[in-house]
Image (cartoon, rainbow, N blue to C red):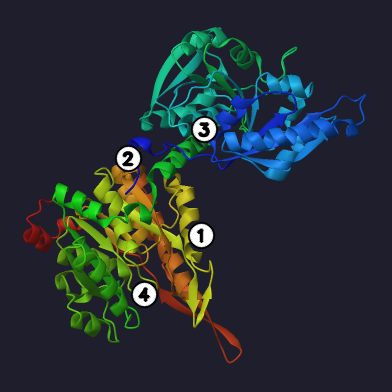
Amino acid sequence: MTEPASRRPVFPALRRAIVPVVFGCDSPLAAHAARALAPDVVLLGFVPVSPQEVLSAGATRARELRRTLRRLAEDETAHARTHVRVTSVPWTDLHQALLDEEPDLAVLEWPVHVDAFGPGMELFLGRIPCDAALVRGPWKDGPPRVLVPLRGGPHADLALRLGLSLNPAELLVLHLQSRSGDRQDAPFRGLQQILPRLPEVHLRVEATDDPAETILAAARDFDLVILGTTARTHENQVGVGPVATRLLNESPSAVMAVRAHRWAPAFPSDEIAGARAISILVDKWFAENTFQADEFAELDKLIELKERQGLTISLAMPALNEEATVARVIRILRRALMQQVPLLDEMVLIDSRSTDRTREIAERLGVPVFVHQELLPELGERSGKGEALWKSLLVTRGDILAWVDTDIVNMHPRFIYGIVGPLLQDPGVQFVKGFYQRPLKVGDQIQAGGGGRVTELTARPLLNLFYPELSGIIQPLSGEYAGRRSMLEQLPFFSGYGVETGLLIDVFERAGVDAIAQVDLLERIHHNQPLEALSKMSFAIIQAVIRKVEHRYGTSILDDVNKTMKLIRREHGEYFLEVEEVVERERPAMITVPEYRQRYGADEP
């Protein structure tokens, strides 16, 4: 089963951190801090020599440093590069090493690395190719109490991100306002948008004309202070600014002064500030709400959670001419999740008038089959997968409803227990999307990574543009997802290809991004669709997103736009156009349908 919520990270860890190890200088704190921030810590050895020495004079010291690196790699759960750089220009060589290694963060210890490398740090920080952190102890083991003083500034986002990534016992944002009320407060506007949506973060506002003194006073109650540096050099300071320098020299607690590689203007526009702030929120959601299917592979524990909460689970399988795969899909899921363990309470097939043996196969295997065009006939017939999903609410009874496509060649029970796991584990989760690697089966050949073209070329760009809070969803169009009936019955459903996008946006609009989770289902092999079908799918998805934008802003766009596609044909060496109507229409929330309310005794909202 998955980690308890209290132990799951509240923010994604960095990928890789670099720590310079200098001959003759102990800097264990930098490696310790790097390990707390990144799973991959690389130790790089440097032997500075004076300009008066020949570089070959450093050979003996380089040998000793290699032994030190091997020992540190064992003790610090890091790994060391065997190549040690002997250099008279250490800052320049460190810059080149960072270009070669491409880390997320360089961690330097204050004042050890400044003293060992000599002058030039301000130039190094001004062109550093990654984010940087200057640290000074004492560093506390375990979740720290973190103070993040912010006035906005170009490096404020990085300070908050690193504070969240430490999974702190407490995190206080100390917003320092100038008593003079100058424009230095402007960069904080973006962070103001998201701080109320970060339950791990507390906010305190103080007006001060002496930021360093205010921070030093507050630091006595915390284990670690994380603050941004400045872009300017002041007198004899080395490019970190007077406030950070004073904290690094005088703070009673540990200090991390950070500098972002790509930082925004000192006074960003509201749009830039808002985008940066939303990026923090999305990264946090991604860390907390992205799971792997094997976290839920202990099915007896899922059954225990299900029974303790008194929940039932239904599986609905939409199908259209899937005689080649539907039998295997049914047998695998029924055997593993109904016969061996009672995770599923019912399975139904929702058919879209298949012309092959799909319905016959399912009925022979004992699965209830419904033709969606024959349900709710008084509402009129519509084609489309979304119509089948909407009507599956009418013919299932589970408190949790899962959907899985019937064209999956490599069906596995994880496709179901993966997407229902977060719903059983966390009552706050309302909707779970699956994602996976998508190799395509073309004839007898498998094309690795060939799937997901509409996702990457249409759906994700549109979500990033209009709903950036959903930009962390890896595969918004995946056909494997699950939700709580209490949520799904209140949502409108697009009848066609726009159904997945519409549901995702509506859950977000109703319950916020934290009500959505996503699960890695590893790999899904399915059959390719022709490019023309993908073009029509994209056209429908664009309509769905625009319709949701209309609802959000109370304006009308689609009534005035074209809903027909001119498809390009070629026959006998000649091109011509063929017009096809692709209209994405919505069905109302199922709870508003009288037959549904009568069947389930539901009250219309």
User: Do labels 1 and 3 touch, CB within 8 Å?
Assistant: no
Closer to the N terminus: mark 1 or mark 4?
4
Query: Which residue appears at 79% of the width and 36% of the height?
Result: 85
| Front of the two marks 1 and 4 | 4
Whether tag 4 and tag 3 are in contact, CB under 8 A, the answer is no
Identify the residue shown where x is 77% and y is 27%.
123
302 on left or right of 558: left
Q: Secondary structure at mark 4?
A: loop
Query: What is the crowding at mark 3: few (fewer than 14 residues within 10 Å), some, or many (at least 20)?
Result: some
Q: Can you give x and y, in whole percent of width and height, for residue 411 in the image? A: 35, 70
**Tag 3–tag 2 contact (CB < 8 Å):** no
Q: Position of residue 136 (x, y in %)?
A: 60, 19
Q: Residue at x 64, y 35 (%)?
A: 71
Res 49 visible: yes
What is the x, y in percent for residue 393? 19, 62
The answer for how far apart the CA atoms under marks 1 and 3 are is 33 Å
Q: Secondary structure at mark 2?
A: loop
